[in-house]
Image: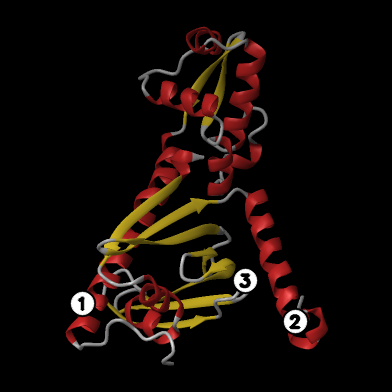
Amino acid sequence: MVYSGAADTDSVEVPLDRVFAALSHSTRRRLVRYLAARDDPPRMSQVALDNGLSPQLLNKHAAALERAGLVRRMPVGRESLLMVDRDALIHAQKWIVDTRAFWEGQLDSLGSYIDELAERGELPINPEKE
Amino acid sequence: MAELSLTVERTFAVDRDTMWKLWTDETHASNWMRPSLTTYGPTLATIDARVGGAYRFELNSGVDGMSVIEGTYLEVDAPAKLVYTWAWEGDPEVSRVEVRFDSVPEGTRVHVLHTKLTSQQSVDAHMQGWIGCLDSLTSTYDPAAQR
């Protein structure tokens, strides 16, 4: 636990809402995509250069992403490397995939139930009947 | 937050009033409100489809036992739109579900928008729910408060 500002994200799972809050900013989504596409973590100065950000602005966004557990800044000499945490990204992705599967299933069930009602001649449902 | 929400749409060959009943009537909801009609038993649904009203769906899957979804209605606009909070029991995360029912020549198009909430948003949603509860209470106990 040597990196600053992320002491509480080291061992404890970060709540999804913090992940989503961090990703609600387009620059931070771009940064995550940029980092995820690279094999090795780049230096902060390289990240700033490649993304057209000032060091101050990059620091701000990196800190927000770090609080969400999405990235880590690893001090190397006088600089830091910025690395993406793939597990946190997978966790966010999983919510979307699981929830979509859930709703597709729900609508399948709704469709089957409507077919059943139609076969029994119970459609349309009379709004007055309780 | 476009990437952090998801949309599912489908068209069904029933009118909007029927579709509304299927979503808000406890008996009908119990018959279909589950991700699979074959691997899940009937759902136990309680629904109070008023702004501020609560709902609870007990899903019965033979294998995993019971899982419960519960929440509060934030918008109830029959037969066009339902908005409610969504939480799995035992999970602190609250999300928001918006279901729209559009009349189309083939019947009714159902549009589900499920959005992940940040802390602040879920606090606001809960506030709306609570204000709704208070409104219902006021109108129950004080007829003069009804407009």
Residue A121 position, x and y percent, is: 21, 87
Residue appearing at x 26%, y 76% in the figure: A114
Please give the residue where the numbered disc 2 appears in the rendered image.
Answer: B139
Asked if residue A50 shows in the view, the reply is yes
Q: What is the number of the mark on residue A115?
A: 1
Q: On the picture, is A3 further left or further right than B106?
A: right
Mark earlier in primary sequence (3, 2):
3
In space, the residues marked 3 and 1 are separated at their CA atoms by: 30 Å
Mark 3 belongs to chain: B
Rendered residue at 55%/8% (across/down): A45
For mark 2, give the secondary structure: helix
Q: Badge 2 sits on which subunit?
A: B
Q: What kind of residue is marked 1?
A: Asp
Task: Please tell me which residue is depicted at 44% across the width and 82% down the height of the picture.
Answer: B25
Relative to A58, residue A125 above or below:
below
Residue B38 is at least partly visible in this image = no
Indicate the quadrant where residue B29 lies. Answer: bottom left
Identify residue type, mark 2. Ser
How crowded is the residue under tag 2: few (<14 C-alpha within 10 Å), some, or many (20+)?
few
Residue A91, percent from left and from top? 43, 45
- Amino acid carrying label 3: it is Val
Mark 3 lies on residue: B51
Mark 3: which secondary structure? loop
Question: Picture quarter containing residue A98?
Answer: bottom left
Q: Position of residue A112 (x, y in %)?
A: 22, 74
Q: Which chain is home to disc 1?
A: A
In the rendered view, would you say B22 is above or below B122?
A: below
**At which x and y percent is residue A55?**
63, 11
